[in-house]
Image (tube, coloured by chain):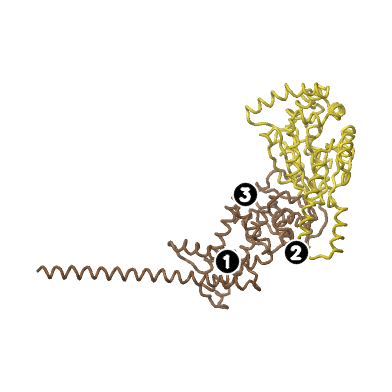
Amino acid sequence: CRGRALLSRVRGAPRALRGLAAGPEMHFGFQSVTEEERREKIYQVFESVAKKYDVMNDSMTLGIHRVWKDILVHKMNPCPGTLLLDVAGGTGDIAFRFINYVRSVREQQLQRKLKRHQNLSWQEIFENYQEDKCNSLGDSQVVVCDINREMLKVGKQKAQQLGYSEGLSWVLGNAEELPFDDDKFDVYTIAFGIRNVTRIDLALQEAYRVLKPGGRFLCLEFSHVNNPLLSRLYDLYSFQVIPVLGEVIAGDWKSYQYLVESIRQFPPQEELKAMIEDAGFFKVDYENLNFGIVAIHSGFKL
Amino acid sequence: VRCQHYPPLRALQASAVLRGVSDEHKKEPFTSSSQQQFDPHPAGHQPEQEPQGPHPSYTGQGGQESEDYESEEQLQRRILTAALEFVPEHGWTAEAIAEGAKTLGLSVAAAGMFHSDGSELILHFVSECNAKLSELLEKEQKLVQLGEAEKKPTDEFLRDAVEARLRMLIPYIEKWPQALSVLLLPRNIPSSLSLLTSMIDDIWHYAGDQSTDFNWYTRRAVLTGIYNTTELVMLQDSSPDFEDTWRFLENRVADAMNMSNTASQVQSTGEAVVQGLMGAAVTVSNGGIECLS
């Protein structure tokens, strides 16, 4: 594993500007900091925004982030029995959507099964109901992993409020060094989190490690807008409106300034695709949403 | 003959689980249009984990990969073949593909590599059936060449070929209507059409058709019509062993043969009529000249 890290670090040297520095200089938004400082600062950012995270998401993206996350889960198309690891999943948005999706697929499956068993006796039907009642998720499970305790707290509260209890677990962990065994998960998702990881290559390697053979890596993240007109409007909105919203709603200008800058510093679609391939994934592809404001990258461990 | 374009292939460092799995789900390897030329791994491969060193991250083009590596395309084909046994239960869906992947030791998420409507699965099935048919016809042809079998008359040959091909649908006949509707989606029409035409072309080739005129087109069009209509009849045939379907097929092929006879008869009749008219015209004009003189 160490050998691989060295290898990809050497390959990553030309991308030093993008924050995979061979040296200690990294970016925090448009500032230049060391690795350790970056981790610290990002932790503080999320600690302070945790409580208002969902509200800010809604107001910044005008609610469109919900659609993006829906599209991500639809693309995943999980079937019952899938084990999902949601990294940087903080407040649980992806996890809840996953559970809903799997539940509805499971219901459809059960309905189809019942339709086929037209000639069962009452006893058999009763038994079928019993065993399926306790299995509404079909053994699917989602593990939400986040480095930030505050975000996990908010997530757990939300889960309680919304009534999600089955098939859900919360783990404190670092994406660059996951506390899980090899070959464990069917799907690994990281939604709007990989931007905040200090060593993206390590996170990708960890993703590769914990996925089962055949497992899928999905990454939803802000990306590069190609269209020049749209790009200008987007920049205008990002730099003028979002930090103001941050100050007004969350009382925290600096965090949202960081957010907008970090989006600009993140590698564009093709580069991220190359990084994912470097980590060992196959059939790597990306889908632009909203002209490239957001992109979903997908890869398979084969 | 698949109209799909795959990105440049890289060597897959398939895990031991993949390599160690037996070939029980794999049918005979066909000479499909694969871009790689290496053999499928032998079934008795020892299931030990080999150290995973850094693998090429850029295309390893040129079919010189070692036998331990498998291309993405090959793996996808293995998954689809494994998925076929779950089709009678789940239909031509991503669920069947997920179950297939599970039997190969892969995660169910591998089904995400394919479209959720099962298009690839159906196209894969059709191309495998076509390849099986070609093999069958080639074997028969060899037997005839070696003198061990009689050469069949055309109508019997066509009948047998179409019947053999349609019989391959029998295990999946319940879910076949769903497959047909997917094959008719605009996205799939180029591929499904090319598979159909190449199959019909194959059958005529082994039937000994060497026409170079318009007959080439009429023959293929006629046989395509026969095949499609028989397929539709088969879908709602409930007779034992599909007897009604084969009878229908026999009648259609006989019709087609008669039609071509009638066509040539019509042609010769037409020629005779024209000659008669010419003769009458000459007689009349001769008679007229005689009158005048």
- Mark 3 vs 1, N-terminal side: 3
Which color has been applied to chain B in this rendered view? Answer: brown
Circle number at residue B5: 3
Cα gap from disc 3 to disc 1, whole angstroms: 32 Å
- In the image, residue A13 sits, relative to residue B51, either above or below, namely above
Marker disc for residue B230: 1
Alpha carbons under labels 1 and 2: distance apart = 32 Å
- At 75% from the left and 47% from the top, the residue drawn is A77
Disc 1 chain ID: B
Mark in the foreground, 1 or 2: 1
Judging by the rendered image, the residue that carries numbered circle 2 is B24
Q: Quadrant of the image for the N terminus of chain A?
A: top right
Q: Residues within 10 Å of mark 3 (few under 14, many from 20)?
A: few
Find numbered disc 2 in the image and state the secondary structure of the residue it sits on: loop
Q: Is residue A262 above or below residue B209?
A: above
Indicate the amino acid at tag 3.
His
Label 3 marks a residue whose chain is: B
Residue type at mark 1 is Thr
Residue A194, image x, y percentages: 79, 35
